[in-house]
Image: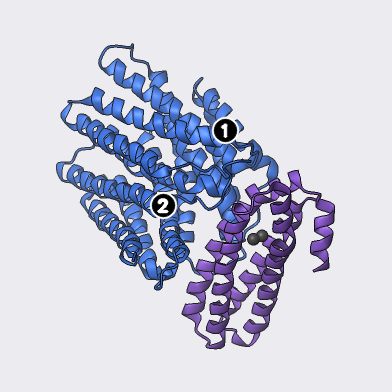
Amino acid sequence: MTGLSLQQAPPFIIVFGFFLTACLFGLVISLTELYMALEHSLFLPLLVHLYTLGFALFTMFGALFQMLPVVAGAVIKSPKPKAFISLFLLITGIPTFIYSFIFGKFMLLGAFLTYTGILYTSFLMLYHLLKIKSFMPTPKGMKFSLVFLLLGATAGLCRVLSYYGYLPISDKVLYFHYTSLLFGWIGLLISSVSFQVVEMFFVAESYPKHFSENYPLLVSLSIFLSIIGNFFSLPLLFLFFAYSFLTIKRLIARKRKIKDYTLYFWYLGQISLIISLVFFALRETLFLPFLFFYAVFFTSIIMGMMYRIIPFLVWFHSSNEGRKEVPLMSEVVPPERIKGNFYLHLVWVLLSIFAYILDKGYLVPSTVHLVSSVFLLYNICRGGMLYFKTQP
Amino acid sequence: MSVKTYLTEEHRQCDELYAKVEKLIQEDNWDNVLEAFDAFKKATLLHFKKEEDILFPAFEETTGIVMGPTQVMRMEHTQAKELIDRMEKAIKERNKNTFLSLGDTFMVLIQQHNMKEEQILYPMCDQHLIISDIIESMERL
Ligand SMILES: [Fe+2]
Ligand SMILES: [Fe+2]
């Protein structure tokens, strides 16, 4: 029972640092899209890694630093230097890796730095998670998803090594790389967090116990099963479909009926997930739509979460530190701005779909996406700065 | 029954009572708000009292951990009570936006608070304390 204290919420700067980096990557993403639209070109590996490594990984690590003590009682002692090592490795590694996609240089260096950063951070979190005895669905799902992060990143590293000729090239490795990272890491983490968050924050019915308790294991098994072939990915699709269906059902029947635009981010994310699953089944011909809708799924949920986490933490830390002027959540990021960002995000999604169907006019959605990501960066940055401004 | 089941049930009841208040305010149904708010406030404060007067002292006595989780929980209760007072004031002034803004902050505070209790503190209590006595004393409050 030693070391169990609930007060060690990590310093605000940690979560803020991770989120801010992610938002900066969001800006890079939209600039890249704009460039590709102007050049009439699409370089998928670059874009996919910007979304996953740049946007998702940073937000999810930042959120995990915050959530481990809250949902699992796993307190990381002296978190600042540890988070710094993690951020340092990733901030040097990921841009180097991304750079290598464009200019063909330093790929090995970028991959190793990124891999070390992922290894360090996930072992740090797994170590703390495994120390505590908890059989609740959320911490359990976090453990599984971190393992998939490790496996998927290792497969990615193998891919890089085979690119350099150190290993034979294998399509199975590539398949395992993206499936374990998209479904096992991102998907499983988001769904495990939903098991806790949806019920509590929207005052909704809890997920069926059997479902949430067995979900991490079932998803894991079905990911391995899906390697065999297309037909065998059906259980995986079914599980995520069930998750999405149960979530939407709960959100609709929620007891808190307040107009809250973070909720709309949740709806958009869940609907996109369902659409993406259909395309995943048809991935041999429709891989791009799958990736697009899956990206809309996780970026929407992440944005919705960020817009709650940052305002709350600014209030919480300022209030704990006994500041005089403690801004309420709605003063950190006014609801109108969340609403504005939601509609920008939605318009980007819709216009992208049109552009894809017409196969022209990509410039319009890219521009909207640029505005949307600048707005997100501005809101998170300005909101977070409020904490530092009120510091005595 | 375990402490976890008993007190988690109360958390959910308080959530629902709060949702009712929020709904009435959303609909500008001010005539019925105060009554609904009183029910919510009463239930929440009673729940805090059960924890502060019975559960936490028992936990501290048995485990010897005084400056640990219970201290943090008490601090968050104080923060929550302050928000409840401000919410009440906003209702009396019929100030919808202020109420909703306070209520939203309150909800996130209380949800992460409840999460910590349900996931960590209550299971620890169930493990180390004689729970039948504790639930009985809480019922008597
Ligand atoms: Fe409490
Ligand atoms: Fe409680």
User: What is the crowding at mark 1: few (fewer than 14 residues within 10 Å), some, or many (at least 20)?
Assistant: few
Chain letter for blue? A
- Residue A130 - label: 1
- Quarter of the image containing the C terminus of chain A? bottom left
Q: Nearer the viewer, mark 2 or mark 1?
A: 2
Q: Secondary structure at mark 2?
A: loop
Q: Indicate how the structure is coloured in the image.
A: by chain
Q: Position of residue A322 (x, y in %)?
A: 45, 67
The picture quadrant where one finds residue B67 is bottom right
User: Relative to residue B126, is residue A238 depicted above or below?
Assistant: above
Q: Position of residue A285 (x, y in %)?
A: 38, 31
In front of the other: A333 or A321: A321
In front of the other: A166 or A35: A166
User: What is the crowding at mark 2: few (fewer than 14 residues within 10 Å), some, or many (at least 20)?
Assistant: some
Q: Position of residue A352 (x, y in %)?
A: 31, 50
Q: Earlier in the sequence, mark 2 or mark 1?
A: 2
Q: Would the CB of label 2 be found within 8 Å of ligand 1?
A: no
Q: Secondary structure at mark 1?
A: helix
For image coordinates 51% across by 32% down, the residue present is A127
For image coordinates 53% across by 44% down, the residue present is A191
Left or right: residue A250 versus residue A67 is: right
The residue wearing badge 2 is: A11
Chain letter for purple? B
Give the amino acid at mark 2: Pro
Left or right: residue B97 versus residue A360 is: right
Left or right: residue A358 versus residue B16 is: left
Label 1 is found on which chain of the structure?
A
Indicate the quadrant of ligand 1 in the picture. Answer: bottom right
Report if residue A338 is visible in the image.
yes
Q: Position of residue A159 (x, y in %)?
A: 33, 20
User: Relative to residue A302, is residue A339 depicted above or below?
Assistant: below
